[in-house]
Image (cartoon, rainbow, N blue to C red):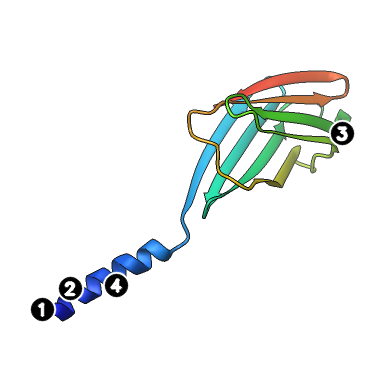
Amino acid sequence: MKKLLILPLLLVFLAACQEKENNLIFNGTSENWSVQLTVSVINGSEKNELELKYRGNDLGSVESVNYYLENTIRGTNFEENNVSLNKNGIYTNEDLSSNSPITISKNTFIISIDWNGNREDIVLN
């Protein structure tokens, strides 16, 4: 009987030791851009991946892009200047990170995107 109890307890312990990962995805769209922010919490640290996609009519005219991303509730922000889009009009940054997880699903982000003298602000939910 004791042997039958040990195996389930061992399986529960091993499952608890596995890496815990939770993902939150925030999306927003404007006339010229679609944005996706994926927030991953892995073992107590937060990693953010941002994807900007140009939806406008003249991709060839977009020389460089500046953006400023802010979590309106928590006050965290990320900013980058003079980024380039790939041939499909997409820019991805996978290196945004935070030492402590503070983002929750109820958070709202606002991203400001500047390009070619234009600016759009997009709310990400």
SS for dot 1: loop
Disc number placed over residue 5 in the picture, else none: 2
In the depicted view, which residue is nearer to us: 50 or 78? 78
Given the image, on which type of amino acid does mark 3 rest?
Ser
Q: Mark 1 points at which residue?
A: 1
- The quarter of the picture where the N terminus appears is bottom left
Q: Quadrant of residue 100?
A: top right
Q: How far, Cα to Cα, is label 3 from label 4?
A: 54 Å
User: Which residue is pictured at 22% across the width and 75% down the height?
Assistant: 6
Given the image, on which type of amino acid does mark 2 rest?
Leu
Q: Which of marks 3 and 4 is nearer the N terminus?
A: 4
Q: How far, Cα to Cα, is label 1 from label 3?
A: 68 Å
Circles 1 and 2, Cβ within 8 Å, touching? The answer is yes
Given the image, on which type of amino acid does mark 4 rest?
Leu
Q: Name the residue under label 3.
A: 64
**Left or right: 117 with respect to 106?**
right
Number of residues whose C-alpha sits closer than 10 Å to that of mark 1, classed few (under 14), some (14–19) or many (20 or more): few
Q: Report if residue 57 is visible in the image.
A: no
